[in-house]
Structures are given as structure tokens and as C-alpha cells.
Image: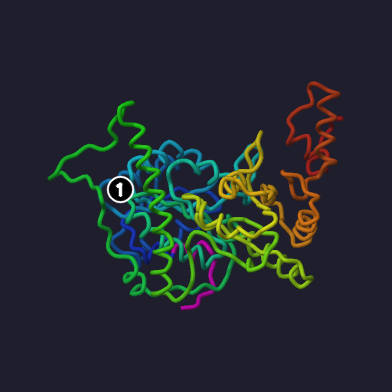
Amino acid sequence: MLKQCEGSHAVALAVAMSRPEVICAYPISPQTHIVEGLGEMVKSGSLEHCEFINVESEFAAMSVAIGASAAGARAYTATASQGLLFMAEAVYNASGLGLPIVMTVANRSIGAPINIWNDHTDSMSMRDAGWLQIFAETNQEALDLHIQAFKIAEELSLPVMVCMDGFILTHAYERVDVPDQAQVDRFLPPYEPRQVLDPNEPVTIGAMVGPEAFTEVRYLAHAKQMQALDLIPQIADEFKQIFGRDSGGLIKTYRLEDAETIVIALGSVLGTIKDTVDDMRKQGIKIGVLGITSYRPFPINAIREATANAKRIVVIEKCFAVGIGGIVSRDVRSAVRNRPQPVLTVVAGLGGRPITKASLNKLLLDAIADKLELLTFLDLDWDIVNRVLDREKKKRRSGPVAEGILRDIGTVASHLA
């Protein structure tokens, strides 16, 4: 059924049709509308056999999800930004215990300075926590990926983050194809946990493991992620057979057939990149797009194969590691190792800064002309940067950087010189 709705509501519908038994909720923008929608469904009775638990913090949300999943319930929660950081210890515990929790991360920048807008810093901070991470380009994909996530998680007994761009997707109204409950039930069977706490068969979980076995435990977590590289495309194919559309998988390609330049990215920015590439194709420029859906596990072989004939690779990422540079691009470099192709890192869209077709077009033309450095910050205002650096040279007590920049650009008033 076609429905015009907010992205958050589309996700709430997908989660509800997946028949969760426990939902743990703590509000933080921009994911709040998802759990609000689910709460309303539970209260009205349209979502049956589900316990909706309001908790006192994000740490508590993940802790309750861990307890619910360990007891044999299909568990779901959602978070963003500092909320994800606050539950970090429990995030690692969930994967270490092998619990198939599904969590939406409505991607949002991490402070300081305080910023509520979109980039990928939050989920990237947990990229090595042992969770599978899948990224949605559109609200239709966000809906579809949540349904697939429960099946992936429960087959492997591993938790899954479904990452969708905060505000850009969560608060955008788009037309989505909402499946009926019978389709979802056909695709997603009732939850049969691989492990469960049962009073009739008492066991413990969370044992302390010393040097004699810790490496083996961690390797097995890695082995499961490697299994996911086969399982994720398989489940995407099953989804297509039942729902009639391509959604999910490891990567998605666009106009790569003869591309000499390949642009790689994750999330909603892929739409703008594709529009830019279409314009450049009209000018005879051989360029294409590779979108990463599964960031963890990282699809090294799929990326290596898809980029085999490219002369250069440009990775546009909405995050970066301070002190070194690109995050996604480092993984891409590992996929194309021992090849002459340069892998160029472009950091863009931090803190919600718009990524425009005009800026992308200029950037990609520079890349094709071999004018880009290995690390580029799209639309960085060098006047502001140099002003701050100059001030710090001249005056030891130059004050906080963020507040100084705001004064420089006139966003806040100040009597300070």
C-alpha cells in the first residue's frame, strides 16, 4: 500500500509489523518520533503482545533490551548521537553476548560543540562494537531494512543497527510502499532464539573469560560477521521475491558500466551524488556511484570487484577521524590494496552542512583533473580556520574555538575584541 508519511512513522510501521515483544524507549532527537509512534500503537492496541518500556536513560534502554533478548523476546530500541555514546558499554555487551537486538540509529552529529543535525559520527564511533551496521539511502530502504534486520539478527544471533540520516530521512515526508502484515509474516517467522534464559534449564550468561579463551570468543564474533556477508544478500533476495523490490544487500551500484571515476558514499547523500553524476554523464564524463549498504561487515570483495576498472575512487563521507582523516576511505583502501587507483577522501556534510550538486560537481571535476589532495574538506571556509589559528598564535588566552568562530561570523554578539 502506497502511503505518504514521515520517515520515522514508516520505520515505526516496519518495526510494528515485525512483531516486537519488548520496545525500550528513551527520547533523543531525531529518533523520538519512531518510539513515540510505536508507543501510540501499543497503547491503542494495534501493536499487540508487546511491552513498551519507558526507561530513564539510553544506557537503561540498551540494558533492558539485553535483558529482554536474553529472556527470549524480540527486542527493539532506537537512539542517536550522545544517546548512543551513553549506552556504549551496553552496546558492546549486547554483541558480546550474541543477542539479536535491532536498533535504529537516527544519525546525528556528536558534540562538543552541541549540534543536533546530521552526520555519521555517532554510528561510526560504534563501528567496531560487534554490531552489524546497515545504512539506508531513502525512507523506503529504511522501512525495508528494518524488516530484514530482524531476520538477519535472529539467524546469526547478532545485533543489528539500521542507520538512517537524522532529519534528512527521519523527518522527511515521502511516499513509501508499506507492506501488509501477511507479507511480513511470510518473510519473517516467529522468533526462535538461539539462546535463552529458561528457569527450567538454568544457565548463566556474561561469564568472565580469561586469556585462555578470550581470543577465540572474539574470533567467533568476527566469524559471524563474515557469515553475514553471505546472509545479507541472501535475505535481500528473499525480500525481493516476496515484496517485489530490490532493497538491502551489501552494496548498490549506479552507472558503473564504463566508469573511470567511482564515487563511494553511505546514506541519503547518495541521491544528490546520483543527480550530480547524471548531469556529468550528459557531458560525456565517465563516472558512476557505489553505495555501501552494509558497512559492518565491510564488503571488501564486493567493493574490490565493483571498482576493478576505475581510474580513481572518491569516497564522500559524513564523518572523519580527528588526527588521521577518513574512516570509510581507509576501509575502501583495504579493499583495493595493491592497485594503482588513488582513493581520495572527501569529508562533507559535518553537523548538517548542505552537500550541494554545485559543490559536488566542482569537487568531482577537480578529482578527474587530479587536483584533489588525498584528504579534502568540502566547502571548508579557510578564512574562518586561518582567523582562529592566527588568533591562537597572537593570544594565549584566545578562548573556546566554537564561541570564537560564532563571534567571527556574527552569529552571537560579544563585547570581546
Q: Residue at x 43, y 72 (%)?
A: 240
Taking 100 as reference, is 325 above or below it?
Answer: above
Q: Residue 58 placed where, x, y %? A: 45, 43
In the rendered image, residue 322 lying in the magenta stretch gets the answer no
Q: Residue 195 placed where, x, y %? A: 25, 48
Point out the residue furthest to the bottom here.
Answer: 1
Magenta part of the chain: 1-12
Task: Identify residue type, mark 1.
Answer: Ala
**Residue 51 seen from this side:** no
Q: Label 1: which residue?
A: 68
Closer-to-camera residue (141/216): 216
Point out the residue furthest to the left here.
Answer: 200
Q: Residue 369 placed where, x, y %? A: 81, 55
Taking 14 as reference, is 118 above or below it?
Answer: above
Left or right of residue 50: residue 31? right
Q: Residue at x 30, y 64 (%)?
A: 48
Q: Residue at x 81, y 26 (%)?
A: 392
**Residue 412 seen from this side:** yes
Determine crowd level at label 1: few under 14, some 14-19, many 20+ residues with C-alpha closer than 10 A: many
- Say what secondary structure mark 1 lies in: helix
Q: In the picture, which quadrant includes the C terminus? A: top right
Left or right of residue 181: residue 379? right
In the rendered image, residue 5 lying in the magenta stretch gets the answer yes
Q: How many numbered marks have been drawn onto this rendered protein structure?
A: 1
Q: Residue 23 placed where, x, y %? A: 37, 53
Picture colour scheme: rainbow
Closer-to-camera residue (83/18): 18
